[in-house]
Image: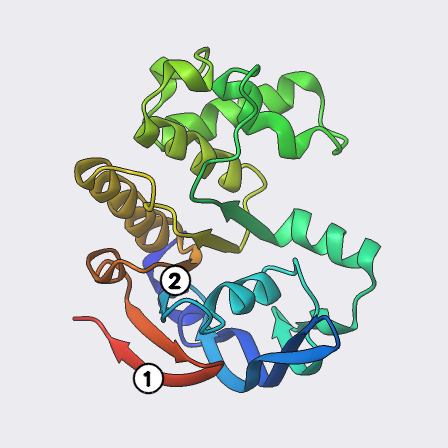
Amino acid sequence: MEASSLADRKQTALIQLRNVTKSYRRGAQNVPVLAGISFDIKDGEFLALMGPSGSGKSTLLNLIAGIDHVDGGELIIGGVDIGQLGEAELAEWRAHHVGFIFQFYNLMPVLTAVENVELPLLLTSLSRRERRQRAETALALVGLSDRMDHTPNELSGGQQQRVAIARALISDPSLIVADEPTGDLDRESAEDILRLLQRLNRELGKTIIMVTHDARAADHAQAVMHLEKGELSARVENP
């Protein structure tokens, strides 16, 4: 993608939240988690979400990723109000538009790296050869061409997370959501993963939203949004 088109995209809001609310039932109690959140995330932005436990950051990430439904308000992504989609429509939307990166990788232990990366494509109409070519390309992008036939227990934590990132990229999503992606890694491996996310953002124009407790990890994002008791308390732009 040309630099000019990337710059044009970054002037456009990919994600728009308007008075979004979310609560959960706990026994007979209704526990509010998000209390009327409103903000925009630009196309091609790398945003870190921070806040204490129970602040609502993981809930917010799950709503944006289409894993959960809003209770009220509007959540519009790429012009689609995903709060109005049914379960089947939402699942199809996720498959095409969202890549997921988790703290504990969520890799299948009996599959090789390339087979793990292929998984999201198994329900598509692509041939086996096409799926394998895409998976190999994604692994090359994260620097693991020489490890594609290794199973997860033959890989380091940092390498397993790279496989997970390749899997998140396999369907070429516009949005990548990362929930504590460096939380289970040593500092050196974490830095490698964060630099990789920066490269995906800067060179491929991927919009990335990352939940983290680590201020040093958040420094790699373009901006940091702080949540406190279900409300947006601050947004800080990183240099």
In the visual, does 137 lie left or right of 188?
right
In front of the other: 157 or 175: 157
Label 2 or label 1, whichever comes before in sequence order: 2
> Vertically, is 158 above or below 69?
above
In the visual, does 87 lie left or right of 142?
right
Q: Quadrant of residue 67?
A: bottom right
In the visual, does 165 lie left or right of 186?
right
In front of the other: 129 or 56: 56
Q: Residue at x 44, y 52 (%)?
A: 178
**What label does residue 163 carry, if any?**
none
- Mark 1: give few (<14), some (14-19) or many (20+) Cα within 10 Å: few
Do we see residue 171 in this rendering?
Answer: yes
In front of the other: 77 or 108: 108
Q: Secondary structure at mark 1?
A: strand
Q: Residue at x 61, y 83 (%)?
A: 20
Exactly how many numbered labels are in the figure? 2
Q: Residue at x 36, y 85 (%)?
A: 233
Query: Residue 12, percent across and down?
Result: 47, 76
Residue bearing mark 2: 6
Where does the C terminus fall, quadrant-wise? Answer: bottom left
Q: Residue at x 54, y 44 (%)?
A: 172
Farthest top residue in view = 149
Q: Tell me how far mark 2 sits from mark 1, CA to CA.
A: 27 Å
Q: Amino acid at mark 2?
A: Leu
Point out the frontmost of discs 2 and 1. Answer: 1
Q: Secondary structure at mark 2?
A: helix
Query: Residue 171, percent across and down?
Result: 59, 41
Q: Amino acid at mark 1?
A: Ala
Residue bearing mark 1: 234
> Vertically, is 228 above or below 138?
below
